[in-house]
Image (cartoon, rainbow, N blue to C red):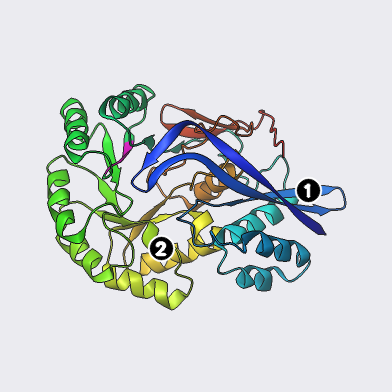
Amino acid sequence: MKASWKKHQLIFKNPAGTSRGILKTKDSYFLIIEDKNKIGIGECGLLKGLSIDDRPDYEARLNQCCENIDSDFLEHYKSLVEFPSIQFGLEMALRDLNSENHVLFPSPFTDGNDLQAINGLVWMGDKEFMRSQVKARVEAGFEVIKMKIGAINLVEEFGILKTLRSEFKAKDIEIRVDANGAFKPKQALEVLKRLGDLDIHSIEQPIAKGQWQEMARLCEDSPIPIALDEELIGIFESEKKSELLSTVKPQYIILKPSFIGGFRGSEEWVSLALKESVNWWVTSALESNVGLSAIAQWNYTLKNPMPSGLGTGSLYSNNFQSPLSIKDGKIGFNSKQAWNINL
């Protein structure tokens, strides 16, 4: 086998606002493995300032990965522990090498016979922009709305949430919020209480990562469930993962394969979470349709009934044509639709 990589910059159709700033572009690296007449493609997706492997030596490590492509997979995978996005790209490319039409996990989903429920994402912005997004998601048939909060204006954000909840009861529209660590520990509990009054399903990462004791207190006292997201990033050892879960005792964890070691790394988190009675769901990390398709296919095999966060494929103006489609708040796979991965 031989391997190479190419960098591709994805361009957002509209700037994407989070509590860490506004995203206009996103870089992905594509690992390309060739073996005789077969080609496998895997996406190594980075988010600047968030991915633990956003490092100056990233491309050098990609070169090493390509040079060692014929080595034992498990040893190769473990050697990349500090580069979880490359682990994911390696797993994906090797599976793709032996696939047909980029179907990595054959199932009723990839046959086009089943769909997966997903949330409709509402990005931060001014009040009218956020209101328009909420309206569009509801009209598009989403029964789960995920709204970014914590960076613009809490008064306006709560106003939008109150309006949404006044129009739709919790049994009709599930609302999740994502704070991306925006709140201080002393402020967070009051915010959580106010969210509880609105029948919010859950909040992702209310305070910044690394504050285990403060997060544990919030998980114990919060009127709504707390999901750990960024908290999982950069924890490589199984013992440390177990320690986090047993210390913080969150209600949920969010699995983003590009951030936590691909399919293998994510499945280890699932196994450890189940031992602590912690539930979970899967979310994309703003990959292109190449990575998103792989995650959606894999997620279907896990048989988790909770709606996932896999509705990000339409964010980019230069995404790749793929069999993925979204209709009535669900993601599907049209096996008759051709791919166009132009790298």
Q: Is 146 part of what is drawn in magenta?
A: yes
> Does 84 appear in magenta?
no
- Type of residue at label 2? Leu
| Residue farthest toward the front in the current orientation of the protein | 56
Does the image show residue 98? no
Disc 2: which residue: 232
> Of all residues shown, which one is farthest toward the top?
139
Query: Of circles 2 and 1, which is in front?
Result: 2
* First of labels 2, 1 by sequence position: 1
In depth, the one of 174 and 125 nearer the eye is 125
Q: Is residue 97 left or right of residue 216?
A: right
Where are the magenta residues, as a range? 145-149
Residue drawn where x is 58% and y is 42% of the image: 293
- Residue 172 on image: x %, y %: 25, 31
The picture places residue 242, in percent across and down from the top left corner, at 38, 73
Per the image, label 1 sits on a secondary structure element best described as strand
| SS state under label 2 | helix
- The vertical placement of 134 against 148, above or below, is above
Q: Residue at x 19, y 25 (%)?
A: 167
**Residue under circle 1?**
39
Looking at the image, residue 153 sits to the left or right of residue 79; the answer is left
Q: Position of residue 22 (x, y in %)?
A: 41, 40
Residue at the spot x=66%, y=64% of the render? 61
The residue type indicated by label 1 comes to Ile
